[in-house]
Image: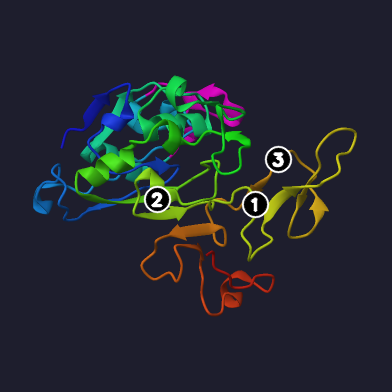
Amino acid sequence: MKPIQIKTPWLGKLACAAVLSNALVGCENTKTNNDLAQPASSKPNVILIYADDISARELAIYQSSQWSGKQGKSVSDPSKLADIPVISRIANQGAFVETAWAATICSPSRAMMMTGQYASIHKWWHNKDYGKIKDPLNGRQRISRLYETSPLQIGHIAQQAGYKTIWSGKTQMKHNTDHSVYGFDEGVFTPGVNYPTIAPHTTFGIMQRKQKVNGKPVLYNADTNKDLPFKSYVQQAWYWKPNVQLMNHPDAKTKSEYWPNTPNPLLILGSIHTDQTLS
């Protein structure tokens, strides 16, 4: 099957079902009374893959003559090109975006993909530059949320088309309240919505000490309580247990729950962990 190359400044126009933040998001057919819905048998399942902070030249599907070598240096050595046969097969059998406009960094680029809006509307300019609003609950200034600036997003469009939606990957939506407002029925969040706070049942992460040294922040390993001897930033184990968080999982006891959440997590995660759920 010849791949479909899509040129669009609005990724939200992809007739699809879900959003991804550095991971896969899958959708399955479901029946609905919505007028936009079609018979389930006429609609394919859709997986939309979106990776931020990576150049298209690193993906073989784009057939670049150069890619990144050591420390980002441009090279043409085939041994330095990432071996990603599954991604290439998905692109060749499906569709891939050839031309798009997005912010050049992390959260703002995902904001454009999720909302189909430029930063002038969604207000996420840069990782350290966001629009502010007054919180209606407490009157304090805070970062504006995408569902406030762009109430119709790609997840909602998928639901209107009769799809069941699931979001798998990064969240970092600048709040830890209900994420189903983005149009997703389920979520597998890596890390959880409380990022950068470590999950309550682990100490696996990198944190910042309250006191600076010579005016500079000091980071430490939360497991060992030892300062880091190298440059890094506050973070969790993003894509691994025990910081994975589930939203609306069919077997979960609560709406939002860290995974794994088992009767005896000590066998899985070690002696420093205890079983906890989120209410």
Asked if residue 132 lies left or right of residue 232, the reply is left
Which segment is the magenta one? 64-82
Left or right of residue 274, residue 49 in this image: left
Task: Give the image location of residue 38, x and y in percent.
Answer: 11, 46
Task: Evaluate whether residue 78 shows in this view.
Answer: no
> Disc 2 marks which amino acid?
Ser
Residue identifier under label 1? 197
Q: Earlier in the sequence, mark 3 or mark 2?
A: 2
Q: Identify the residue position indicated by label 3 in the image.
A: 232
Residue furthest to the bottom in view is 263
Asked if disc 3 and disc 2 are in contact, CB closer than 8 Å, the reply is no
Q: Is residue 139 left or right of residue 39?
A: right
How far is disc 2 from disc 1 in space, using C-alphas?
21 Å
Q: CA distance from mark 3 to mark 1?
A: 16 Å
The quarter of the image holding the N terminus is top left
What distance separates the C-alpha of mark 3 from that of mark 2?
A: 32 Å
Q: Is residue 120 above or below residue 28?
A: above
Relative to the observer, which residue lies in front, 150 or 262? 150
Give residue 113's position: percent from left, percent from top: 38, 32
**Residue 48 found in image quarter:** top left
User: Which of the pair 262/185 is nearer the observer?
Assistant: 185
Q: Which mark is residue 12?
A: none
Tell me the tag on residue 180. Answer: 2
Q: Amino acid at mark 3?
A: Ser
Image location (x, y in percent) of residue 190 = 50, 51
Q: In the rendered image, which quarter is residue 11 located in?
A: top left
- Was residue 191 drawn as part of the magenta stretch in this picture? no
C-beta proximity under 8 Å, tags 2 and 1:
no
* Sequence-earlier tag: 3 or 1: 1
Q: Secondary structure at mark 3?
A: loop
